[in-house]
Image: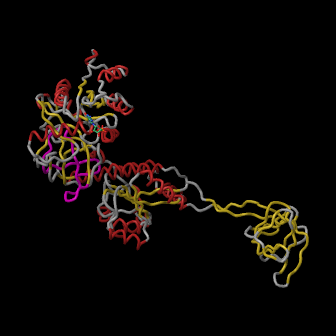
Amino acid sequence: SVRPPITLKELASQMKIKASEIIEKLFKQGFSVTLNEMLDDTSIILVGDEFGCQITIDRSQEERLRVTEKSIKEEIASTDNGMLVSRAPVVAFMGHVDHGKTSLIDAIRKSKLAAAEAGAITQHIGAFRCHTKHGDITILDTPGHEAFSAIRSRGADVTDIIVIVIAGDEGIMPQTDEAIRQAQEAHVPIIVAINKADKPGFNPDLVLRQLADRSILAEAWGGDVITVSCSATTNQGIEELLEMLALQSEILQLVADPTTRARGTVLESEIQKGLGNTATLLIQNGTLRRGDAILFEHEYGRVKTMRDERGRHLTKALPSMAVEVTGLSEVPSAGCEFIVVGSEKEARKLAEERLAGVKRENLRKTTTTDLQSFFLQHAEKKEKKLLSVIVKADVKGSLEAIETMLLKIPSDKVRINIISSSVGVISESDVEWAKASNALILGFHTRTEPAAEDYAKKQGVKVLIHEVIYHLIDEVKEEMTKLLDKVRQENEVGSAQVKMVFRSSSHGLIAGCQVIDGIIKRSNIAKVFRGNTKVWEGDINSLKRHQDDVREVSKGLECGILLSNFKDIQAGDVIKAFEVTYITQTL
Ligand code: GDP
């Protein structure tokens, strides 16, 4: 009896077998596992079967995997009032392209950060904090739409207020409507920034009317939606916008408990030279401290360093602060929640257990743990061709997008097997792995290390790198198609009647024919019919008109046909000619 989660190493020692033997056996079955990897149910049963012992799986411990059932909001709501303190609002800027989101955020950053600390070098970490008379504000400067959507699509709520940026000289455009819709769906209050006030065509009244058409009533129109005219170019109205944000947040009564262990959401993540895996975390409850062990979804870490947008190293971060942390096992995805746990060891164990759980769940969906049906399914799958791939990309978000798209390529005939996907450049070990598993390497916004490039050439490993996701997917489709056997197809192109048969000393039996239909080509294959019965099938050895070899003869003409090795051709037979083509199958 084994109690998952269990690593291969642990299982090996329980079974008193060498781990390397297990790895080898699993590899032969198409599973590649490493020593410290948590095994899924199928692998465990498979190992038992391979080594001739019956393994039962005891799953009584699984409940432990949930660190907490409550969402961050629920957790705060159930906290004793005495512990709660007010926190800064987290603000996102959204709107139509070119209406000035980036410019406004830049203008705020410049005026605020530079004023606070002359000559400070600021860096992009995905969010920054600014100070107003009415309190602090955290501004997300991950380019509005995409980051917000990515985070939202994972179900995370990070924004308290959304600034809808509308260029006052253009008015509401399609993406403005989209932004409004997203804010409404997420139940996040909006403030409207009517930007480009310095431009000649600036017409805030038009914007107010357009908003009213959408049932969004500005304060000036007797409603409760705050609108501010501003200009990112002249800084006009920017201070007012910030104050309005701070005031709006007072109404929202945003609170958190700084005394508890930290929880929050990943805003951005990337691998940085010299720093390794980094992520910008928005603290939504509790306090994050340097040295804390954090658990993401399947990633974990121990906060090694923590910096704010001014590059200052911090020892702790409070609710609504965004900090860039290092010390992570892998890069977590934007929108992924994190929580601080007791120790790094615990974090790691939980992360790996969860991952094994996911694998198990996936397997449960496709197969029962009953071994026989598993093998049946396996056999079935083997009939499909398999295209194995290793995916590398610049950021985690792209990886997920690529994986989803790869798995969505519709095909009854080819199955995609993603052997691994990770962030970074394509290295020699990727090539080695690709070679061992007969896989392609797919790169998106990444490159191949020079040594790996040579190695790939030498090993005959194909590396496809693209900057546009659709191009990458298209090329994968091509590769999938190449795996399919071509289908042989015969088309009748002509027929000839045998008038008489004569023997040539050098060639053997020649059928003197008249083409009665279509064209007969030397390259065709022939089928000989006597009455309704096919008596022979084979190649046309030669085709003659008078004494000359010709490539084709058309209807009405007479010709001599020499069939390869057919000694029984008779007058009255009909020779039908077929063209053979090999058609590429579609996926
Ligand atoms: P985004 O696509 O919404 O992020 O828009 P950008 O911030 O990139 O701005 C688009 C263009 O509008 C840029 O050329 C900016 O210089 C210009 N722009 C942005 N804000 C203003 C403004 O207040 N006044 C004027 N005149 N131009 C602006």
- In the image, is residue 288 part of the stretch drawn in magenta? yes
Is 86 or 76 nearer to us in this picture?
86
- Quadrant of the rendering where the N terminus is positioned: bottom left
Is 381 or 435 nearer to us in this picture?
435
Q: Main secondary structure of the magenta part?
A: strand
Is 488 or 259 nearer to us in this picture?
488
- Quadrant of the rendering where the C terminus is positioned: bottom right
> Looking at this rendering, what residue extends furthest in the bottom direction?
505
Q: Position of residue 237 (x, y in %)?
A: 19, 28
Residue 274 sits in quarter: bottom left
Segment tinted magenta in the rendering:
271-300
Q: Position of residue 358 (x, y in %)?
A: 36, 49
Residue at 44%, 52% in the rendered image:
369
Residue 205 sits in quarter: top left
Q: On the picture, is 282 further left or further right than 561?
A: left
> Looking at this rendering, what residue extends furthest in the top direction?
222
Colour logic: secondary structure
Q: Is residue 332 above or below residue 228?
A: below
